[in-house]
Image (cartoon, rainbow, N blue to C red):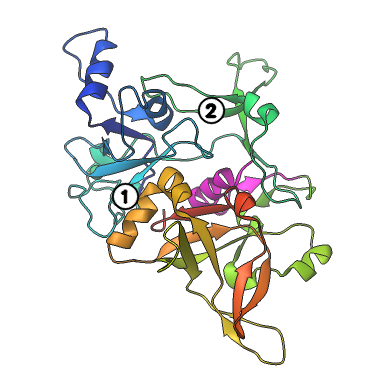
Amino acid sequence: MCAKIMHAFPTEASAIQHLKKMLTQADKAISPITAYAARSMYPEHISDQFHFQCPSAGCTAPVTCRSLSSQSKYKPTFVNQSVKIDLHKDGCPYSPKFENPSSAVNKKSTPKDTFEFKGKLESHLHPVLFQPPTPAATSTTTQTNDLSGTSITDGKYVRHTSTPGDRKRTKEITHHLRSMQDHVDCFTANKNSLVRNAFFSRPQPIRNFFSHVCQNEFDSALDDIPFLKIAFGSARINELPNRPELLRITFSESVRLNNHTNTRLYPSFLISRTFLENEFPDILQYIDEGRPSLRAFIRAPFILNAIDDKAYLNFDITPEALLYNVHFYAYQP
Ligand SMILES: [Zn+2]
């Protein structure tokens, strides 16, 4: 698992000039910025999602900012731009090939800002699929556009009563996992992270909210389970010959139908190209890079469709709801 890119350097001259203007000492070098800071500079000082590079000293590997526009449905996030051709310098902890950032030979190259959740985690996953964020939910989010690199905090501070001999006040943060993106980020950071959820009396490892796509449920099973898990698996992305506005995502794992035919089908779904262009621009690049497999996450029950006597295993979800119940990574993050 390579380190998650929490900061990156913008490469556009107007962005660099803007950041330099904000420095108190003229001779100081600019620091890499958070994805939220990048969003605050779009489109005035940053014009494109692809105009970023690795925060590692001396590494010029390109980095993409997903969901850069403030109109985006997702939180802005930095990801590696090129996965098949790894352009990071030798030993860079952000290289997708880098297995374990904590074992870096050169300690100086170990990032200080590896991604982890500190504090309590609370999942808002419930029987209903993920919905567009409501104004009430977003108002509890503290979004820091601080260009000095302070990362975003989503949660509330809880002050513990200080005990004698310990005059320091500890602040504990509760991270609220409200969206598909929040759950996937937590799962990919550490599958064993303990998460509270109204369904369970005790905290559960986040992996209990996920299942391999071959174990995904059909609509008919939904009455018998407390909630639908987030299905995931490796998948391919394909263009459709007659419908350029859509792309097909097909999971690589087949599912055996529990009927007399015992047919095996590969689950697939269609998704809007414009949506991917805005929220997952790095994923679209993989089509050009020869379609290596990506990691897809979806929360929707299976549905069996028949077209021209051929059976297809798809997901029962409207195109609009799909946009809030899907996530992708180009590699094992
Ligand atoms: Zn790098």
Of the image marks 2 and 1, the number of the one nearer the N terminus: 1
Q: Is residue 30 left or right of residue 215?
A: left
- Give me the disc on residue 147: none
Question: Are there few (<14), some (14-19), or many (20+) residues within 10 Å of tag 1?
Answer: few
The verdict on residue 188 being magenta is yes
Q: What is the x, y in percent for residue 16?
A: 23, 22
Residue 30 visible from this viewpoint: no
* Real-space Cα separation, disc 2 to disc 1, in angstroms: 27 Å
| Cβ–Cβ under 8 Å for marks 2 and 1 | no
Q: Quadrant of ligand 1?
A: top left
Work out whether 221 lies above or below 228: below
Magenta includes 171? no
Q: Which residue is mark 2?
A: 153
Q: Which residues are magenta?
A: 178-197
**Residue furthest toward the bottom?**
260
- Residue named by callout 1: 103
